[in-house]
Amino acid sequence: MERSTQKNGTVNFAVTLLIFLAALAVRIYSGSSATWGAWVFLGLGWLVASISRFQMRLEENERLERLEMDELARSRGTSLFDAKDSGSFPARNAREQFEKYFVPGFTILLMLLEAAGAAGLWYGTSKNPTGFNESSSTVTLSLFAIFALLLFLFGRFSVTMARLENNRLLRPAASFLLASAYVCALTAIAIAGVEARHLMADFWVARVLCVLLGLMAVETLLTLLLEIYRPRIKGKVGRPLYESRIVGLLAQPESLFTTAAQTLDYQFGFKVSETWFFQACKKNLPVLILVQLAVLLLSTTVYFVDAGEQAVLEHYGKPAGVYGPGAHFKLPWPADKIFRFRTEQIQSFDVGYTPDAQSESARIILWTVGHGKEDNFLVGNRVPTMDANASTNDSATTKPMGLITVSIPVQFQITNITDWVYNNSQPDDLLQSLATREVVLYLAGSDLNDILSHGRLDAATTLRDRIQNAADERQLGAKIVFVGLQDIHPPTDNEVAATYEKVVGAEETKLAKILTAESDAIRTNAVADSGAFTLTNVADANRVRLVTSKYAEAALFTNQLPAFAAAPAVYRQRMFLQNFAEATKNVRKYVLLATNTQDILIFDLEEKVREDLGNLNITNSP
Amino acid sequence: MKKNAVTIIVAAVLLVIFVLLLFTFQVRQSEVVVKSTFLKPTDTITNAGLYVKWPWPVQSINRFDQRVQTFADIPSETLTADNTMLVVNVFVGWKISDAKEFLPKFKGGSTADAQRYLENMLRSAKAAVIGKHDLSDFVNSDPAQLKFDAIEKEIKTSVDGELAKNNYGISIEFLGIKKLGLPQNVTQSVFDRMKAERTKLISKAQYEGEAEATKIKSSAERQAADLIANAQADATRIEGQGQAEAAKTLAVFQQNPELEVFQLELAALKASVNQKTTMFFDETKPPFDIFRKLSQPSPETK
């Protein structure tokens, strides 16, 4: 290996390191996303330059070692050093160990850095797409232009050197140098774009670099995998694992076919690049590109408008007609351009809420459960009463507002596409703003309790008319098809809606109490009615019984009179004895038949559990 | 030779495209273009079509959207005349009325910058106008009392005045209130008040229910008492009628009072004794005097 090649490797190493550090400083100073991407690319280039330089030194050492051994063998004229034990060639062993273990390990690290760089850049640009400090644009632009120039000069020289000397180890760093020059130039163009008020140019160039880094990571991974299956041909020196074909193509686009051919040859182990197909493609490439461009241009002369759509055709910027569904012809781009819009299709937006996945899948809609992200609207609030006689002179009348959440889907169609396209910059946003304004206005002038109950239907109709009028006033060219008040309720926050439900519950409880009392009243009245009826009936029965019995007794008495007149004593005695026997049939009787009237008889007439004569204690006192 | 011809054709096509791109430009119906010569605005093109220009850096163009552009300001907290905090968000429709004036006023003719300046003016005008109005002008259950249109008109007039002071090349086409809300703390208080209102209604329903139930029960009990009292009176009257009717039979008994009294005594005797009665008889009382009679000799035996 020539000394100049090694020097060239060292220069590449130094240049990439210096510009890498300078790019880092510029990146911090400007905050530009594109400079971030360029810095990552430069860092990878420096790593590749470092390892290729180190590998060059190992190969140089091996070459010197071989020369020394050859010289020694010639001077001694023996084959003493023919031995092929590994201890005799330390430089060669070091190079082999390096290529066997370090290079694959480094390539894996390189792949991880490429992937991490792509992911980090993507995440960073997504988070802050316009983080560029515009005041630093001139300095950034100048410095990156200088970086591009320096890298181009050194890169071009290295690439030429690598080709002339057919040095496989110089090639990766040289390609990286030249590709870095283009990346820095692209970054400078992005900064210039920002200066020209194309504020997103920085962002999009950063995204392009993201994709490039991602592709490089994928390529490195594939190279590592394919290396396992690549056929090893004795004596053929492999290309460095860390050499990127994408970077090579980027640095030397003219070598597309050469790179492709080398890749195919290298991978398949035979000369694919010498097949007729490959040669034909290579020979007719300009024609193929021209044909491709012509086809591309011709394809812009036909356009298809889908069902439900209309297209506005502009001829050099002037509206040249509106076309419905079907196939149509036009002049090629950029003379004629078309802009499609969904005119027949019902489009919609929501006022008052933003649906989420949970609310979309809800199987029941309740006041107490939020339906996506809901906004609170101010609404008028008269004192809430439940009957007309309630007092209105209370503290509630001093607060004329309440809060309410509404979910209002608004559906519309584009009826006049010319008005829709040319009168307003963002007609969708404007229509949504107008609808929201009408909803805010309507609710602010409504009563909370009215709108929650009987006012809903009127509200939908009124809102549709008002939104339509506002859209017509602004010449939007849209027809409001439907406005729905599908969900109006008190806010779910702080259990306000739950308290409203409890009022309904309390009303039901009140009604239940009244109904229970009415039920009790019916029972009480019925019992009283039946009692009164019984009382009068019993009285009447008593009356009838009394009268009847008295008349019967009178009749009996009339019949008894002759008997009594005939034998008063006998009749009297008979009646007495009959009645006495009957009356005293079950009566305890004591008949005293004592003749000795001086004796005192004592009877214990205390009631016993069992009353019989056996329990009776009779004491005969003298 | 053939290869060279193809290359020449490709190069010629690319050259034509490049030249066309350098010397021509299109203006869309929705656009207004300011053509500058050596960076000095020299011409404003509002009609759509294809136009020619000298290539950069001799002539350059700046394109602007000449349609109405809409933006909404950030919702901001403002005090009303009666000291209520409101969070108000306004949307504005504006357009570039004079592109040649617009271009130098904002860096690179940036519409984003223009909107930023407009928003500053808008916020100032909004606060000033809202501060002159009471809450009832914004929220009122009587829609006739609302003054939305007047408030929006006042804000627009104020912003128009600011724009007129320095010709920005901008005109305000319309302005509307997009959001009307309350700060978080006030919102919480309103929630509490709304809950208190409902709690009051709950209490009202509860106690009205109890009162109504008590009234119904009391009324029913009074009606029942009336019914029973009337029934008892009727019963007494009916029984009196019975007694009066029965009294008509007394004349029959008067034919032999001795017999009737005897029978009444017998009935009284029957009614006054029962199973628990203990009676003592001596041998002198009939029918037990039979024992004495039996122990004495009969007159025949004497």
Image: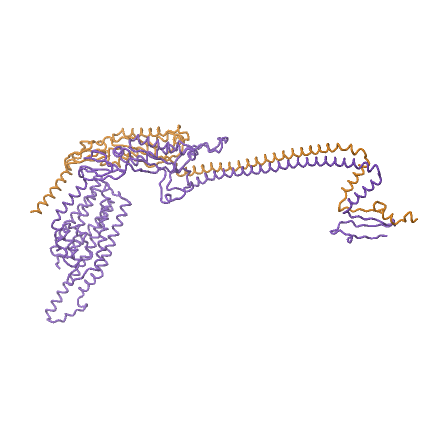
The chain letter corresponding to purple is A
Q: Looking at the image, which residue is at 14% across and 71% down?
A: A80
Residue found farthest to the left: B1
- Residue A136, position as x, y percentages in the image: 23, 42
Task: Please identify the quarter of the rendering in which residue B79 is found.
Answer: top left
The image quadrant of residue B193 is top left
Q: According to the rendering, which colour does chain B have?
A: orange
Q: Position of residue B167 (x, y in %)?
A: 25, 30
Above or below residue A622? Residue A200 is above
In the rendered image, residue A199, in percent from the top left (x then y), is placed at 24, 41
Tag count in the figure? 0
Identified at 24% across, 38% down, the residue is A325
Classify residue B243 as left or right of residue A346.
right
Quadrant of residue B145 within the rendered picture: top left
Residue at the limit of the structure toward the right, as seen here = B302
The image position of residue A183, as x and y in percent, is 19, 48
> Quadrant of the image for the N terminus of chain A?
bottom left
The answer to whether residue A476 is left or right of residue B60 is: right
Colour scheme of the rendered structure: by chain
Relative placement, left or right, of B106 versus B52 is right
From the viewer's side, name the closer residue of A311 and B143: A311
Asked if residue A282 is positioned above or below residue A365 in the image, the reply reads below
Above or below, A407 relative to A35: above
* Residue A332 or residue B297, whichever sits in front: B297
Q: Is residue A366 above or below residue B95?
A: below
Residue closer to the observer: A130 or A386 = A386
